[in-house]
């Protein structure tokens, strides 16, 4: 799994669970 893909999964998990996205790698989510 690529680093970028892993970050995207983390962004998605944050979004789904209702937490605010982590701005430094979730810009645009």
Image (cartoon, rainbow, N blue to C red):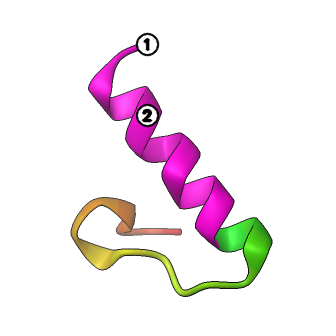
In the rendered view, tell whether residue 11 sits above or below residue 20: above
Check disc 1 and report the residue beneath it.
1
Pointers 2 and 1 in contact (C-beta within 8 Å): yes
Q: Residue at x 31, y 77 (%)?
A: 23
In the rendered view, tell whether residue 25 sits above or below residue 9: below
In the rendered view, tell whether residue 1 sits above or below residue 14: above
Check disc 2 and report the residue beneath it.
6
Q: Quadrant of the N terminus?
A: top left
Which element carries disc 1, helix, strand or loop?
Answer: loop
Magenta stretch: dominant secondary structure: helix
Stretch in magenta: 1-14
Cα separation between marks 2 and 1: 7 Å
Residue 16: horizontal and vertical position, in percent? 77, 68
Q: Nearer the viewer, residue 20 or 29?
A: 20
On whether residue 24 falls in the magenta region, the answer is no
On whether residue 5 falls in the magenta region, the answer is yes
Res. 28 image quadrant:
bottom left
Q: Residue at x 66, y 58 (%)?
A: 13
């Amino acid at each position: 799994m690529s680093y970028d893909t892993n970050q995207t999964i983390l962004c998605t998990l944050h979004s789904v669970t209702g937490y605010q996205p982590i701005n430094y790698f979730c810009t645009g989510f």
